Image (cartoon, helix red, strand yellow):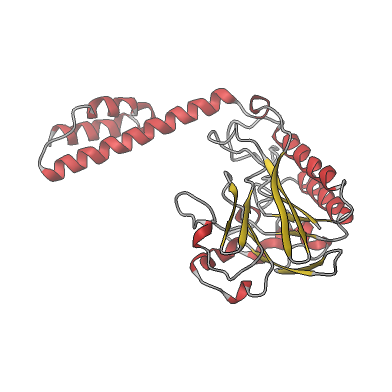
Amino acid sequence: MHIVYCTDAHLSASTPEHPSPRKHRRITYESDIMAKLQWVRDYIGQFDECAVIDGGDSFDRPTEPLVTSIRYAQWWRDIEARTQKHALQVVGQHTIRGYSLASIPSCSIGLVQLMGDALLDTHQWKDRTGFTWNIRSLHCDKEVLLGVPNPPEVLGADIIATHISIGYGYGCTPPEAIRWGSPRIITAAHIHTGFPICEYNGTVFVAPGALARLNADEIHRQPQIAHIEVEAGEVLNVEYIPVPHRPAEEVFDMGGLEQDAEAQQERVEFRETIAQIEAARASGGGVVEDWREALEKMRGEVGDEVVARLIGYCEGT
């Protein structure tokens, strides 16, 4: 059986009634995401026996414009038809309110819930050999299970599809630290960078990263999906497949992103300077010499009054 795994599409559109909270997106953002989703639909069409796992955060906000929500629902209907209902979705925090699964019916993802059992916690898929694969979804509200060895929610699962912080970096639990028995596969989402295919304690970890490109630090990342081949309880092969996409400059205002990145760097330097000032004051060593330059850089961001107060503070130490 072939399993196609994609995640974090973050489909969104900006309208006067639903303006996008993210700056520097062009109007082409929605069509870029939909084109990638349609590519996934066409990709699975080449297989006689295929299943699909969507790792969550299909929408960028709990409630997207109706036409956008319907476009996605139509795509999912096609996915279910092509996989003979061998398709599931994990629920990410962007698609619901306050990490509450109870809010699903009032959100855009509720259209998927209306169509069937894609959002259920447990699924069973039978491959051509007759082997039954038990799949467990861990939605975004199950973050607490990351540090729990062998929680009852995952016992007996052959595949665990997650939308929690498995990965590398701040606040993440690395794959090698997961202690959930011996599932054949764990799919990871939420962390947009993903990580290379790896195996620990008999479990293959799969994290191709997000289909979407949201921020300045990921606009040049190559979106990809995972193609997993399984049969009779065994994992035969896993590979990442690149997904075609528009050039970043067609989807984002690159100049605006660069300005934001520069402003963010100035804020980081400002905070570091203030931290140095506090450390020097606490140690009785006076203030660092370049504090005045750092404060002047931030005048346009924090205002004259704040800068004046900080200058007075520094001159008095």
- Residue visible at 22% across and 27% down? 290
In the rendered view of the protein, which quadrant contains the N terminus?
Answer: bottom right
- Residue visible at 62% across and 73% down? 153
In the rendered view of the protein, which quadrant contains the C terminus?
Answer: top left
Q: Is residue 32 above or below residue 87?
A: above
- Residue visible at 68% across and 41% down? 224
Residue lying furthest top:
255
Foreground residue among 243 and 113: 243
Judge left or right: residue 281 versus residue 198: left
Residue lying furthest bottom:
152
Residue 191 percent coordinates (x, y): 56, 49
Foreground residue among 157 and 26: 157
Q: Is residue 108 above or below residue 221?
A: below
Residue lying furthest left:
284
Residue 139 percent coordinates (x, y): 63, 62
Q: Residue 245 falls in which quadrant of the image?
A: top right
Residue 120 percent coordinates (x, y): 73, 67
Q: Is residue 92 above or below residue 125?
A: above
